[in-house]
Image (tube, helix red, strand yellow):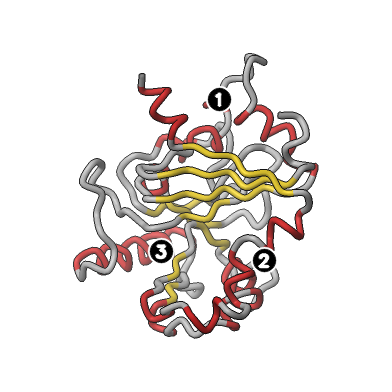
Amino acid sequence: MAAEEEMKKKKVEIFDTEEELAVSLARKLKEPPYVGSLDWSKWHVFWLDERVVPKGHPDSNYKLAFDGFLSYVPIPVENVYAINDALPAEGAAEDYENCVRQLVTKKVVPLSTITGFPAFDLMLLGMGPDGHVASLFPGHPLLNENERWVTYIKDSPKPPPERITFTFPVINSSKYIAVVVAGPGEVEAVRKVLGSGDGDGHDSLPAGMVSAEGELTWFLDKDAASKL
């Protein structure tokens, strides 16, 4: 019964190309008519994981978001919550969790009535070829973290090695989760997580551990979905 309920909350959308998929998601919001019709003052932007590098570094997720989206839309600067890149990984994670806790106190971010963890409106996730999401990697002890809201990793198998990340209890308390995967590089991980009948085990990869209190939707292009 629980499995049936979980499947009801999960959807898969397949697009012809990576470009079509991207246009259908956040990049479209910076274009008319959306950019002029949304109430951007209500938006609060967080990073569910971030590389511990300067904001201007090519590896920075902040830089990626700023260059591709945030610089085009009028979200108030005070509503954009980047990590403190002057701190080491452990300090940056603690600082970011304190930031979220303060916003919970101010009722900017609600708590889940089910889990007691922050309940964000939307989590936008990608997935790596190894099935990792955020900075939660296969076989890593952080997969089992169930108390911290934000934690850190210093031995990421994908460079750069130092990162901060939301934990699964926070990710899975979200009202809506969108997992976006494009291209052939992740096709085997997609098959293992979303396929059926091959005995790989849905929960063997971090991406298979993603759920949502509301709805979980996978957005795939045809390459990523080619083995489903």
Give SS at disc 3. helix
Name the residue tied to disc 3. Answer: 91
Disc 1 residue type?
Answer: His
Residue 180 in the image: state x and y as whole percent. Answer: 62, 50
Q: Amino acid at mark 2?
A: Asp
Residue 25 left/right relative to 46:
right
Q: Secondary structure at mark 1?
A: helix
Along the line of sight, which residue is nearer the eye, 217 or 57? Answer: 217
Indicate whether 9 appears above or below 160: above
Front residue (pair 191, 12) = 12
Q: Which mark is residue 43?
A: none
- Amino acid carrying label 3: it is Gly
| Position of 146 relative to 55 (above/below) | above
In the image, is residue 18 above or below residue 92?
A: above
Q: Pointer 1: what residue?
A: 202
The earlier-in-sequence mark between 1 and 3 is 3
The mark closer to the camera, 1 or 3, is 1
Measuring from the top left, give residue 3's x and y in whole percent: 42, 23
The secondary structure type at the circle numbered 2 is loop
Q: Quadrant of residue 73?
A: bottom right
Mark 1 vs mark 3, CA separation in Å: 34 Å
Relative to 168, is 21 on the left or the right?
A: right
Residue at position x 79%, y 42% from top?
Answer: 223
Q: CA distance from mark 2 to mark 1?
A: 30 Å
Answer left or right for 153 relative to 43: right
Tell me if residue 207 comes above or below residue 1 in the rendering: below
Q: Earlier in the sequence, mark 3 or mark 2?
A: 2
Q: Identify the residue under disc 2.
A: 59
Q: Between disc 2 and disc 1, whose residue precedes?
A: 2
Locate the C terminus and report the quarter of the image it occupies: top right
